[in-house]
């Protein structure tokens, strides 16, 4: 997983996960090894759907997810302005939900 800047993003749209029915409450993020939250921005909707399905199939995870399409440059700029970590998940990346994530 790589962290990109605006100049590395080629598409105008990306996809992120939110809690089902609560898209205004924020986006799904995972904690890195330092305890800081990292927002996943998926370049492909199929990858976001697959990740959400993995979360929903986890017996210990009781939340349903929605996939939201966002403007890639705006999402990245918002993260940078607010000093929020993000990771652009490309079609070449494989991401598996951690066992003990905190939304």
Image (spheres, rainbow, N blue to C red):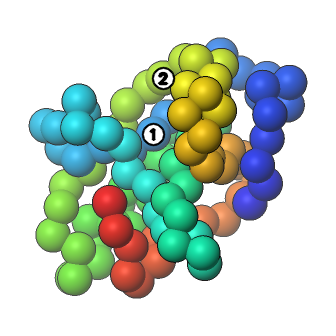
Q: Is residue 93 above or below residue 8?
A: below
Q: Nearer the viewer, residue 30 or 35?
A: 35
Residue 79: quadrant of the picture: top right
- Side (left or right) of 62 relative to 12: left
Q: Nearer the viewer, residue 41 or 49?
A: 41
Q: Secondary structure at mark 2?
A: strand
Residue 22 picture location, percent across and down? 17, 38
Placement of the C terminus among the 4 image quadrants: bottom left
Residue 101 picture location, percent across and down? 38, 73
Q: Is residue 34 above or below residue 7?
A: below
Q: Is residue 56 above or below residue 67?
A: below
Q: Nearer the viewer, residue 5 or 19?
A: 5
Within 10 Å of disc 1 (Cα), the crowding (few <14, some 14-19, many 20+) is many
- Side (left or right) of 62 relative to 46: left
Residue 55: quadrant of the picture: bottom left
Q: Is residue 32 visible?
A: yes
Placement of the N terminus among the 4 image quadrants: bottom right
Residue 33 picture location, percent across and down? 60, 78
Q: CA distance from mark 1 to mark 2?
A: 7 Å
Give the residue number, with chain letter if any, for mark 2: 70
Give the residue number, with chain letter if any, for mark 1: 16
Residue found at x 53% / y 64%: 36
Marks 1 and 2 in Cβ contact (< 8 Å): yes
């Amino acid at each position: 997983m790589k962290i990109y800047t605006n100049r590395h993003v080629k598409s105008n749209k990306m996809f992120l996960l939110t809690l089902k029915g609560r898209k205004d409450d924020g986006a799904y993020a995972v904690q890195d090894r330092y305890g800081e939250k990292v927002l996943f921005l998926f370049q492909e909707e199929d990858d976001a759907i697959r990740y959400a399905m993995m979360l929903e199939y986890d017996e210990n995870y009781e939340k349903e997810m929605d996939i939201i399409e966002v403007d890639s440059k705006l999402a990245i700029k918002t993260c940078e302005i607010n000093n929020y970590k993000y990771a652009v998940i490309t079609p070449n990346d494989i991401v598996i939900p951690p066992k003990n994530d905190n939304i």
